[in-house]
Image (cartoon, coloured by chain):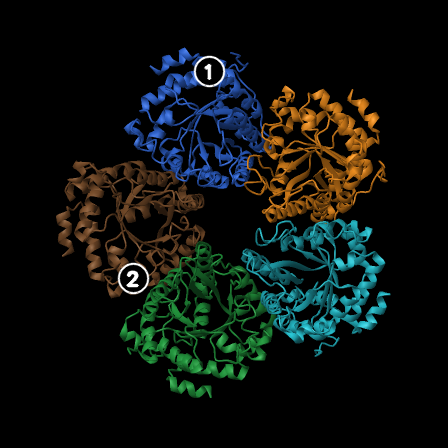
Chain colours: A blue, B brown, C green, D cyan, E orange
């Protein structure tokens, strides 16, 4: 296991050149707020009510509290997370009652009804950056960033590349940061969890000027006959993925990498994976969503605290696990 | 039968954060007007002259009065309904002669000629929110809200999500409320009356920031061999649907749910169903259209009064039925 | 034969609510001018040079004068018609030499080359309402209205509904009236001359706020075995169609119905049909095009005079026929 | 041979009604300049570097001088032509060194790579009329008109009709004239050289308000068994085509017709055909391109002079031929 | 071997007529800076992180330094290149730390995931020229030009022709130069390395007004049985290609031709080919990308120096090779 030099500590904020002089302080404050000045991030992503419809919220294994959209805000306002990302409309509905939360407005979303086999994914802006700014100015909410999901390799890639690129520019011009969700997807994408393709995606993110990039954690395919890979322990396999993920972190350059998902694991497995991502791969942190809001508030808070311990406080997996209990 | 705590009484108006300070009073007045301050709504929906062409108005079982578009306005101005929703052009043609009506401008519409089997539905704005505002300012009519039909799961979903989202924002920015008609429809939608999918739809509505969401009432499919379901009485079946519909009401959060349609029933059956929707499911009320305007004015007024009794005055089904006579 | 109460006489002008106060007088003057204050209209439609290319103008049975586009203007300036509708470019080319004509600018047009079997019809604005206004202001011509052709039921219906709806709003906002040409057409339209579908179309027109709607005159299909229909005299058949057309006139409400085409008949047959349309169906009048401009000027003038006698002066068919000679 | 009354002589300039008062003088000067006040035009069309790529310029039978784009400007500045039409970018590259040339900016172009069999032609504006105006104002060049190619009958006709129509309006509003290149083309166009279809095209041009229309010269198909046509001399055939072309000239009304191409003939054949077009059909003149720039400068100048003699000076074919030598 | 008269020496800068008077000095300075006043250019093209994803950067034969995007900037700031072309976002991320570099903002990009066999290429603007200007004004970076990739012959050609054409105009209007990347590509393009087609492409570039055009170096296909071609030495083959490429340089006229790629060769082979391109074909220089950034910084600097020796200093191939060591 080769741990990177990714030790928790103050990191300088590189202010991009498309942030104008008079917006530099505002941009720096926003970055400082969500990264704790450490170049780290624990994103609470709450855009699933469109992306997954009611599949998460009405699920058999979800807490009944999760049926009510307000549940998301209760967690966001109390948990040790960097910020809460959701759509403008939902934030408008509940934001004033949870005004301590740093909000990130997710600009686009699509439902999960049209499958890739029918049509390559297209998800376009539901609000423009200009509308987000107007919202920020008139709502009094603490809106610190914007976000966008880009389906790389979709036949409609051009439309999304344009929207993402211009939105990043608009965010920076107005002193806000930007999180790019980027997923290779479409009929021409065979292996969307391939580590090299993931590095392609994070490279696109830095090229577009995103401050943070949220990607799926890669999966390694074991080649038939590769005895070493086949006989690896789960720990060894976990390390192997984290090593492979280094390519994506390197390709992202100054853009901080946030990992979402990966193989479904229980809470403890999640913490181990997170530790690997941050300490082996060099990622900035994680995005959490379903794993958190499907739990009752008190459990959700503990889960976030444990993840934050690894991301922000240099905790070991064992130390983090203690928090869960 | 588990009745919800959905007792008629004053309910606080949550003013969304995208309503600017100087528009809050106007927004609150509009909501108060149509909900009677009770969090309830009886919507008179009159967009059928495009959506159904002349099928309702020239129907054999429709009152001859219904052949004339003015019939809609006669009802709207006298009936105990919250507001009348129609297209800008029709409101412009008759509105000045029926100036006591609170109007909701439906932004989009499509005819019923192109079937889903030929092409997924696309219904786009026929007027922009800006044009509605101009109309409101220069006409002197009491225009309190806007509406839009969104076909969730259509291949053209992205275009409609954008228009709906931006229109909601524009309405709020100008002190008006918004009603979202939302119907899952398209070649990838097999069961558009599924209760879980309906909850997905109402969840989308709150995420877009809609104040009201109008959905089709679910239907339950009886699984072959489910003896309990097969042997249920009509009353038991009605309760079962109302219970299943709770998921959608919960998913909608602060967005008030208005039910349209459902299984075709006679006036008395309609009242029973409405009572269930409001008192079991927790819905805010109903949208009525064909059921009302296909009747002569005096019958239409009685029908609305009976529905209003359940929605606004806590009437029992029996009490409401008496009004019909 | 049931004649309607459609007696020639002064009719009040309903000024739509989207005409602003300061434009009401201008709008009322325009309506008064073309309807003679009678709620009637004889439209000279001259958009065929794009819609039919040179098929009408170079036809074997057309007057040689018709080969020159100026022929249209010679007729328009001398005939007893309400107004002349054509494209902006053509009006610009000849209008200053025929400045007594009230002009209606037709916003869109398409050629007849692409058949419906290849692609559903799409006809979009060639000039915007804003450009028409600029033209009106700088040309000094008497431009009183705008027009648009909408192909209801086309797969591209949404685009045309939007353009028509917004153009009507723009016309009204600026004191001009609007004529909607509306034709059900597309691969999903089997019977475009069905009286019920025609009523759907006129219902769409009033819903969009059009002041006049131009539709094709219906055709009745005789069901095999319907002995009464099969044995009907031509006169009886004519009355039956006029009766069936009442549905469309009713559905149009305050929007005045103008009939175009119908079964090809000679001049005398045309006058009988026109009399039926106005006096039985309750239509406001007719649109004439090919029937007029394919004749030499003097014959065209007589033809218009005969039609005007029925529409504006309550003439009988026999009285009108005398004018032709 | 029926010669028209198309005798060379001063012709009045009809100023279209969409040219505002304050731009009338500028428009009239531009028309006077290119028509010599005679209602005639010899257009040097130089848009081939996109339309034909390097096929003309690198051709085996082209003069080596033609390989350099500057060759076009050398000819344009010395030849007796009305004006030179090309794309904005090319004019910008060389125009300051050839500032005596009256320029016409061709707004759209497409390459010849995608065949009609693959997709109906679509050629859209590469610069807007507003950009041309800005160019005119800041460059100091003598830009007198704009041009556009419209593929009538293409499935994308609507898009091109709109662009052409609005560009003509914009040109006139700013005192410039407009040349419409119009070619029927697409999978639904079987005979693009049919004289009647050509008349349809010129009719569209006048309806859009174009000042000049450039069309392909028709071809006559000899019906099998038509002995008279089969036994006709080349001279008789030439006259027959010129007679058939009268329909297009008539349909164009006040729009001046410029002929391009036709059957490939040598220089002398070209002059005979041109004489027929002008003196029999009544055309305003010709567009020349390849026929000119594929020759060395001195030959090109003679060729233009010969054509100009027929168009502007009433020369006979024999007189014109003498100039070539 | 026929060497052109393309001797290194001061060349006059032709300022295009779409550069306004008050921007002429700025434009001339930018051209002078990147061409050294010699009409020559060595472009460092760094747009691959989107165009090739991570294929170059994570390649087995790439220097490990290349994994970090900052590597590109280290080279750009120290190497003897004319300027560095990349996307706005990437320049914004690192530009302030490498402020001595003259930057060219590449407006569009696409990933390499969707193959031509699935869909013709479409690459649209990710930022507009107006945004680049805003970036230039507020960042303080030395942004001297813009660039765009146009896929000639793609079914989406029209969209790209428009964007390229308008961007060139916008660049010139604001005193910046423009580099057009132009590649014939699409299902209708069989031989994208054909010299004649390449000349078509460079002809399009000058017609759009580009200052520089970057094309792929042609390949010659040996016809079966052409003994002379088959028996040619590599040197003779190299000269033959350079001769064939003259057509493209001629067709480009005043637009300077920059060559990219060509057959994969080693560093020494590259220098020979470059010498041929400049001295035989008459090209202005070369674009380098992968060949440079896949090397460690010191090797990359030597590579650029050797290329610059040929382009700017008239070095022989032998002289240039010495620099590599």
Above or below, C203 relative to C315:
above
Residue in view at x 46 percent, y 68 percent? C26
Write down the quadrant of residue C58 in the picture. bottom right
Residue B112 visible to an observer of this rendering: yes
Residue C251 locus on image (x, y percent): 33, 65
Q: Residues within 10 Å of mark 2 (few under 14, many from 20)?
A: many
Q: Residues within 10 Å of mark 1 (few under 14, many from 20)?
A: few
Find numbered disc 2 in the image and state the secondary structure of the residue it sits on.
Answer: loop
Above or below, C55 relative to A53:
below
Dot in front, 1 or 2: 1
Write down the quadrant of residue B280 in the picture. top left
Find numbered disc 1 in the image and state the secondary structure of the residue it sits on.
Answer: helix
Q: Mark 2 = which residue?
A: B57
How many numbered marks, from 0 up? 2
**Foreground residue, B110 or B231?**
B231
Q: Quadrant of the C terminus of chain D?
A: bottom right
Residue B8 visible to an observer of this rendering: no
Left or right of residue D300: residue B197: left
**Foreground residue, A263 or C141?**
A263
Q: Mark 1 = which residue?
A: A230
**Foreground residue, B68 or B236?**
B236
Identify the disc placed on residue B273: none
Residue E190 locus on image (x, y percent): 64, 43
Compute the Cα span from label 1 to label 2.
Answer: 71 Å
Left or right of residue E285: residue B110: left
Left or right of residue C88: residue B130: left
Which chain hosts label 2?
Answer: B
Residue E149 locus on image (x, y percent): 64, 40
Whether tag 1 and tag 2 are in contact, CB under 8 A, the answer is: no
Which chain hosts label 1?
Answer: A
Q: Quadrant of the N terminus of chain D?
A: bottom right
Residue A147 locus on image (x, y percent): 48, 33
């Amino acid at each position: 296991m080769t741990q990177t030099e990714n030790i928790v500590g103050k990191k300088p904020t590189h202010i991009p050149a498309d942030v104008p002089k008079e917006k530099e302080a505002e941009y720096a404050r926003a970055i400082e707020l969500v990264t704790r000045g450490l170049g780290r991030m624990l994103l609470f992503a709450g855009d699933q009510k469109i992306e997954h419809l009611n599949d998460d919220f009405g699920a058999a294994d979800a807490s009944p509290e999760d049926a009510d959209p307000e549940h998301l805000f209760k967690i966001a306002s109390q948990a040790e997370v960097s910020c809460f990302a959701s759509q403008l409309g939902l934030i408008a509905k509940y934001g004033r009652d949870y005004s301590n939360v740093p909000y990130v407005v997710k600009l686009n979303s699509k439902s999960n009804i049209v499958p890739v086999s029918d049509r390559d994914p297209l998800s376009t802006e539901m609000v423009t950056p200009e509308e987000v700014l107007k919202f920020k100015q008139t709502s009094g909410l603490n809106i610190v960033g914007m976000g966008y999901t880009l389906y790389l390799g979709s036949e409609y890639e051009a439309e999304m590349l344009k929207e993402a690129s211009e939105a990043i520019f608009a965010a920076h011009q107005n002193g806000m940061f930007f999180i790019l969700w980027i997923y290779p997807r479409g009929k021409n994408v065979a292996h969307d969890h391939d580590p090299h393709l993931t590095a392609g995606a994070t490279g696109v993110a830095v090229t577009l000027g995103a401050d943070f990039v949220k990607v799926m954690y890669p999966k390694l395919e074991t080649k038939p006959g590769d005895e070493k890979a086949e006989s690896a322990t789960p720990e060894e396999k976990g390390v192997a993925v984290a090593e492979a993920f280094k390519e994506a972190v390197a390709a992202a350059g100054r853009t901080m990498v946030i990992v979402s998902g990966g193989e479904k694991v229980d809470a403890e497995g999640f913490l181990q994976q997170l530790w690997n991502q941050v300490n082996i791969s060099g990622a900035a942190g994680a995005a959490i969503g379903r794993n958190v809001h499907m739990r009752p508030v008190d459990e959700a808070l503990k889960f976030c605290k444990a993840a934050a311990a690894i991301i922000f406080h240099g905790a070991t997996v064992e130390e983090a696990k203690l928090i869960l209990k």
